[in-house]
Amino acid sequence: MGASADGTVIFDFDGVLLRGDAFGLFLRRTAFTGARLPLAVVLLVLLAPIAAIPAWRPWAARWMSRIGLWGRNADELQAALERFGTDLGAEPGRVIGPGLRMIRTHLAAGDRVIVVTACEHTLARAVLDGIGLAGVELVASRIHGPKLIVHNHGAAKMAQLAAHGVTPPWRMAYSDSLSDLPILSAAEQPVLVNAKARQVTRARRLLGARLTTATWTNPPAGDARR
């Protein structure tokens, strides 16, 4: 039997808990460097028009990932992802403080918190563990070597949650992306984070008065993880 709505809270990762695209940063900083840098530039030029179309964005991301990770040993790649995630979570200003505090609030209230993300699992897990969220459940994309096995994006998140034993409705869901409308629409209380006015308008057409919005920013100085 799947989890009921009572006490189940879904959080997106990139843009809600972590500033930026974690896996994209991994590719830019570690995969597309040295001799691969010219290839990265060519790919960005070719794929940019495709990535601008929301329906084609996952396809473009899949190819960027495959080419960026091509030739990497699976064990070495997993170790590199783990190291990068640990370091990324420790970067000043990288963690979105209000998002982290909200997760802690839900945990303190006894809620079941699940982070559901398109980010790669080992990388996201290392970030969560490093910022004190080792006990939080994670449903994420998975790779084996350079091959993307599960791309946990958009509607695929619903299927991966079901495989994890979690079925709608859930009590709350937090996301910054309209690609998560299936997740948000299945929540009793959907929250759109740091959204532009156009995003809010589109989401409200589907979600109606249930939708609330939140603006989460870090202070200009200090540790956002506090």
Image (spheres, rainbow, N blue to C red):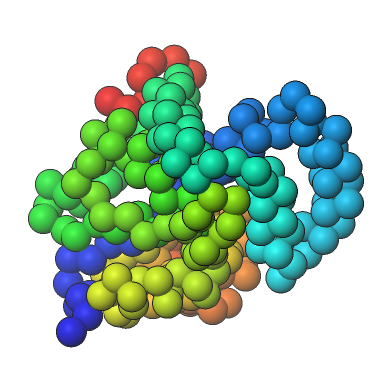
Q: Residue 39: horizontal and vertical position, in percent?
A: 83, 39
In the image shown, does 204 or 160 lie closer to the viewer? 160
Q: Quadrant of residue 3?
A: bottom left
Locate the C terminus by quadrant: top left
Q: Residue 179: horizontal and vertical position, in percent?
A: 58, 66
Residue at (12% x, 52% y) in the render: 109
Q: Residue 17: horizontal and vertical position, in percent?
A: 41, 42
> Is any atom of residue 81 visible in this view?
no
Q: Looking at this rendering, what residue extends furthest in the bottom direction?
A: 1
Locate the N terminus by quadrant: bottom left
Compared across the picture, whether 175 is left or right of 171 comes to right
Above or below 172: residue 131: above
Above or below 135: residue 84: above
Residue at (40% x, 66% y) in the render: 190
Residue at (77% x, 33% y) in the render: 36
In the image shown, does 147 or 127 lie closer to the viewer? 147
Q: Residue 127: horizontal and vertical position, in percent?
A: 38, 36
Residue at (71% x, 34% y) in the render: 32
